[in-house]
Image (cartoon, grey):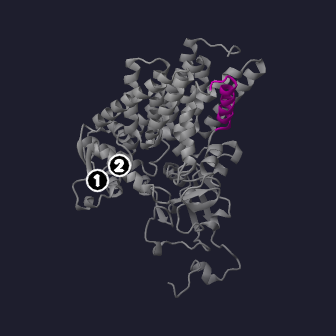
């Protein structure tokens, strides 16, 4: 690091500026996105639990992130909860959440969604500050600044930072727990041990992926102790982690209000039963083989290459370059064992993702990103010559341009290897390009062109009626209208304006993946936020077609 110098005050102030930039960019871009696929469910669940303590709403995630997201809604005086209804006996949380968001509170749904996103944005800013802390303490302030820049400008983190989903929140708390334990290993004190135990418990309440912390931190503790040539030290660290785990369980119990009771599906009583019921529900969910999409193919279950494709198409190329150089620096300086806490967790987490049967988005490897940024910051140790400084600055500039170009549509970001968002749909779609986020943009487009009605295939749960969009439903996921009454023929679509979500266009979740193959073979008139494709079908599709077929959209009279 002798080739690059930066005093602590300058590095800290520069990092603060980037944190403010991250906050403002995420806050502004949040206004452009309608509620994504499950956001209304998480918001309804969090507000219901916060208001009533009701625990029948199951979403296969712990409660903490939903409660934090719903907390600002207490500032609104007229948020209404669905009244008691016999239908709730079916435990249909989607029906309950739909009534909460789009019927009882439709008049202020946009405000509810926006306020609920604020805590997630703030958590991500805290994550970025933690990245600076770890990187600067391990490799100096310039490394901390580089790592924080990689974090604050990352399009994927910005995409999920402004959404009410578990992804960004659990990423934050998993990282903070790992940071707290790493700092304890650096200098074991009672205060640091207690902070690590509390952080570990909060991480468990934020997301079930945090369970990976127990074996990984144990392995890192053993490695750290043995690296100093002291087997006794390794065992001491392991005992300390066991005691911290007890603190974590106590914290988890406290977050759930010290409740104790029977756990459905286990047949025994435990502290925080709601938490363990959600875990049982998740384990049952993981036994399903859902539809997935990768590289133009629709399939069920998991493919090992899904997250390889995700990593190398969605991660900015400058970030990949920094991380590769950082790994080289760590190996060259023989710090692999010393930095085991830094690389063990992302390596284990990513390896587990490769064998996962759940291929539903880059967001499932989001927890590796903070460690990737810190490893990238370690690359500053390789800088010696002036030309190397220019290369490092150039890479950061490249990342800044890529991030700025993606604004405000961060969810659709793809790197230059696949030609950006326009080429992204050929590789990944669901929650990587299209998650039902662009209804506001569609409304603006239709209003500007005075389109009275559009044929709409919408991948999302937000009702288009909320934005005043007049439409005729097409085959979609989730389905809208009765399939037998949809005005659509896959070979002879009726004349008019068509708006088709990218996920439906490629058939990622449709029972008939080639439903919209006619449109896939044609260039769209326009795209909305890179996720909705606009087509204009002329009055006559085929001059050689029989007039009856054109008029009846290919349907036989007997079928009518």
Label 1 belongs to which residue?
264
Circle 2 Cα neighbour tier, 10 Å, few/some/many (<14 / 14–19 / ≥20): many
Query: Where are the magenta residues, as a range?
Result: 316-335
Q: Nearer the viewer, residue 530 or 381?
A: 381
Q: Nearer the viewer, residue 290 or 110?
A: 290
Q: Residue at x 66, y 50 (%)?
A: 422
Q: Residue 421: percent from the left, percent from the top?
A: 63, 48
Q: Residue 319: percent from the left, percent from the top?
A: 64, 34
Q: Nearer the viewer, residue 374 or 304?
A: 304
Query: Could one spot residue 391 in this view of the protein?
Result: yes
SS under mark 1: loop
SS under mark 2: helix
Main SS class of the magenta portion in the image = helix
Q: Residue 57 vs residue 22: left or right?
A: left
Q: Residue 260 vs residue 178: left or right?
A: left
- In what quadrant of the picture does the N terminus appear? top right
Q: Splitting the image into 4 quarters, where does residue 15 fall?
A: top right
Q: Is the residue 53 above or below the residue 458 in the image?
A: above
Q: Nearer the viewer, residue 477 or 288?
A: 288
Q: Residue at x 28, y 42 (%)?
A: 272
Q: Residue 413: percent from the left, percent from the top?
A: 60, 43
Q: Splitting the image into 4 quarters, where does residue 346 fall?
A: top right
Label 2 belongs to which residue?
278
């Amino acid at each position: 690091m002798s080739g690059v110098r930066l005093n602590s005050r300058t590095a800290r102030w520069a990092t603060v500026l980037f944190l403010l930039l991250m906050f403002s960019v995420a806050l502004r871009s949040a206004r452009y996105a309608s509620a994504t696929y499950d956001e209304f469910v998480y918001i309804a669940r969090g507000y219901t639990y916060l208001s009533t303590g009701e625990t029948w709403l199951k979403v296969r995630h712990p409660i903490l992130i939903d409660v934090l997201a719903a907390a600002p809604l207490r500032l609104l005086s007229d948020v209404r909860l669905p009244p008691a209804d016999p239908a709730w006996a079916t435990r249909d949380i989607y029906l309950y959440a739909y009534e909460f968001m789009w019927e009882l509170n439709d008049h202020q749904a946009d405000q509810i969604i926006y306020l609920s996103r604020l805590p997630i944005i703030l958590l991500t800013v805290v994550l970025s500050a933690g990245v600076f802390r770890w990187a600067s303490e391990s490799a100096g302030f310039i490394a901390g600044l580089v790592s924080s820049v990689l974090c604050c400008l990352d399009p994927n983190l910005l995409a999920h930072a402004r959404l009410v989903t578990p992804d960004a929140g659990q990423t934050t708390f998993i990282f903070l727990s790992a940071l707290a334990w790493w700092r304890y290993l650096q200098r074991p004190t009672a205060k640091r041990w207690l902070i690590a135990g509390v952080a570990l418990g909060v991480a468990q309440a934020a997301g079930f992926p945090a369970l990976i912390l127990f074996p990984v931190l144990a392995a890192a503790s053993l490695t750290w102790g043995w690296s100093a040539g002291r087997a006794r030290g390794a065992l001491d660290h392991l005992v300390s982690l066991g005691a911290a785990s007890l603190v974590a369980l106590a914290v988890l119990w406290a977050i759930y209000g010290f409740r104790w009771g029977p756990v459905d599906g286990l047949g025994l009583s435990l502290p925080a039963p709601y938490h363990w019921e959600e875990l049982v529900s998740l384990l049952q969910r993981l036994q399903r083989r859902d539809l997935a999409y990768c590289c133009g193919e629709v399939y069920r279950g998991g493919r090992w290459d899904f997250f390889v494709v995700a990593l190398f198409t969605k991660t900015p190329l400058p970030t990949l370059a920094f991380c590769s150089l950082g790994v080289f620096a760590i190996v060259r300086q023989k710090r692999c064992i010393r930095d085991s806490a830094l690389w063990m967790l992302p390596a284990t987490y990513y390896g587990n993702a490769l064998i996962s049967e759940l291929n539903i988005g880059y967001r499932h490897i989001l927890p590796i990103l903070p460690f990737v940024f810190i490893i990238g910051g370690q690359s500053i140790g390789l800088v010696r010559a002036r030309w190397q400084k220019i290369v490092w600055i150039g890479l950061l500039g490249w990342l800044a341009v890529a991030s700025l170009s993606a604004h405000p549509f961060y969810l659709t970001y793809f790197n230059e290897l696949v030609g950006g968002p326009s080429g992204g749909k050929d590789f990944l779609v669901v929650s990587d390009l299209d998650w039902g986020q662009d209804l506001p943009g569609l409304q603006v487009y239709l209003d500007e062109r005075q389109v009275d009605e559009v044929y709409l295939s919408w991948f999302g749960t937000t009702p288009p009626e909320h934005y005043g969009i007049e439409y005729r439903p097409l085959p979609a996921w989730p389905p809208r209208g009765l399939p037998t009454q949809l005005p659509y023929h896959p070979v002879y679509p009726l004349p008019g304006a068509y708006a088709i979500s990218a996920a439906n266009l490629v058939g990622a979740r449709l029972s008939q993946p080639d439903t919209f193959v006619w449109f896939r073979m044609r260039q769209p008139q326009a795209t909305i936020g890179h996720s909705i494709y606009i087509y204009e079908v002329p009055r006559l599709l085929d001059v050689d077609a029989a007039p009856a077929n054109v008029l009846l959209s290919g349907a036989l009279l007997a079928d009518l």
